[in-house]
Image (tube, rainbow, N blue to C red):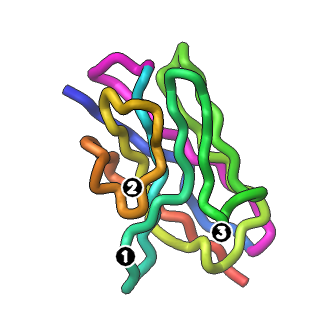
């Protein structure tokens, strides 16, 4: 059974940093898309960062490009989202998700292509 477990959220001041973790179990880690999505109160869910676990290629939406970085530890089946220069508008519940057996194109606007989701971790950035 596929499971995703996120951790690492918290509260920081603007300009600060956080690192989110997403541990993936229950299926072959390689050759899937893993994405981070976020949802702020009153807003729709949006995709922000994506990694293809087969080769490590990444994609970021413009609002986080240059501030957020994805990395992976294949031995631990874990993806990390390094968030720097955080802004109040980054405040949201962050979810990691996996699209099993994807062809390598990982971007998703709302995440409808993604099959499994974690429980979410809250990120709060104060001004």
Location of residue 85 (image quadrant)? bottom right
- Whether residue 58 sits left or right of residue 95 in the image: it is right
Mark closest to the chain's N terminus, 3 or 1: 1
Vertical placement of 55 versus 8: above or below?
above
Please identify, in this view, whether the residue under mark 1 or under mark 2 is nearer the observer. Answer: 1
Q: Residues within 10 Å of mark 1 (few under 14, many from 20)?
A: few
Q: Which residues are magenta?
A: 14-30
Q: Residue at x 43, y 36 (%)?
A: 33
Residue 19 in picture, x, y percent from top left: 64, 48
In the displayed image of the protein, which residue is found farthest to the top? 75
Residue receiving disc 3? 63
The label on residue 120 is 2
Q: Secondary structure at mark 2?
A: loop
- The mark nearer the N terminus, 3 or 2, is 3
Q: Which residue is mark 1?
A: 44
Q: Along the line of sight, which residue is nearer the eye, 11 or 86?
A: 86
Q: CA distance from mark 3 to mark 1?
A: 15 Å
Q: Is residue 17 magenta?
A: yes
Label 3 vs label 2, nearer the camera: 3
Q: Secondary structure at mark 3?
A: loop
Magenta stretch encompasses residue 62: no
Rendering coords of residue 1 (x, y %)? 19, 26
| Label 3 crowd bin: few (<14), some (14–19), many (20+), radius 10 Å | few
Residue appearing at x 60%, y 71% in the figure: 90
């Amino acid at each position: 059974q596929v499971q995703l477990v996120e951790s690492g959220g918290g509260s920081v001041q603007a300009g600060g940093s956080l690192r989110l973790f997403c541990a993936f179990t229950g299926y072959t880690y390689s050759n899937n898309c893993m994405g981070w999505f976020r949802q702020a109160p009153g807003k729709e869910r949006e995709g922000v960062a994506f990694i293809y676990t087969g080769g490590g290629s990444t994609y970021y939406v413009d609002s986080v490009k240059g501030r957020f970085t994805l990395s992976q530890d294949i031995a631990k089946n874990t993806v990390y989202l390094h968030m720097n220069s955080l802004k109040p508008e980054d405040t949201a519940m962050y979810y990691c998700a996996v699209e099993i057996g994807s062809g390598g194109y990982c971007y998703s606007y709302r995440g409808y292509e993604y099959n499994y989701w974690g429980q979410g971790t809250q990120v709060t950035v104060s001004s």
